[in-house]
Amino acid sequence: MKDVMSRGLVGALAAVMVMLWAPPADALLRLGGDLRWIPLGVETMEEGGESFRPGRQLESMGLGVRALIGIEQFGIGLKINFAHHAFQDPDHSYSHLDLNAHLRMKVPDTRVAIFAEAGPVMALDIGGVGYNGAFGAEFDLLGWPLVDLNLGLAAQYASVPVGAGPSQVRMNQGVRAMVFVGVDFSLMPGFGGGSRE
């Protein structure tokens, strides 16, 4: 599984570099960010050979920023996410960063877009480098030409090694569900205005 994720990440990052190096003439640069709420999860923790299911708290929150290049219907780029996961036992709570290759595709003749992302993840209480993958959908509430206000749902699988003391690691892995609201700004080549077709 880790080998598959690694090869997929390398391939996605290579595609990002190719598109950034030689973007199409009608390319859009899409810059955006989101605020996410992560209330639900089906996950396990393993520490000292013992496995248990932590109780997730409703105050689990996160945020992300992304930069994509492509056309209106398809974009590829990078996404950086920060999240704080709060559990019933505060000793199990932790924060992490992930750096993901991000793909976004708009559903024709709608305001809906679907996306997928994957990449490495690291807890701020460093226990090693894990991996994550996510997919979801977002709906543009505005329908404006160059600004999107997105409301979305996503699911993420993550395997995160969290430092739990000297030479100790607590492994957190499983699926989380999240709701998010975000804003995207699209810029035409040369940062000139113009309307999108």
Image (cartoon, rainbow, N blue to C red):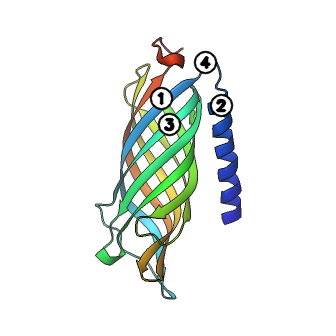
Q: Earlier in the sequence, mark 2 or mark 3?
A: 2
Say which element carries label 2. helix
- The residue indicated by pointer 3 is 67
Q: Earlier in the sequence, mark 2 or mark 4?
A: 2
Q: Position of residue 128 (x, y in %)?
A: 52, 70
What is the number of the mark on residue 21?
A: 2
Task: Report the residue at 47% width, 11% height from top.
Answer: 194
Q: Nearer the viewer, residue 90 or 174?
A: 90
Q: Earlier in the sequence, mark 4 or mark 1?
A: 4
- The residue indicated by pointer 1 is 111
Q: Position of residue 187 (x, y in %)?
A: 47, 22
Task: Report the residue at 42% width, 61% height from top.
Answer: 96
- The residue indicated by pointer 4 is 26
Q: Amino acid at mark 3?
A: Ala
Q: Are marks 4 and 1 in contact (CB under 8 Å)?
A: no
Q: Nearer the viewer, residue 96 or 107?
A: 96
Say which element carries label 1. loop
Q: Are marks 3 and 1 in contact (CB under 8 Å)?
A: no
Q: Amino acid at mark 2?
A: Trp
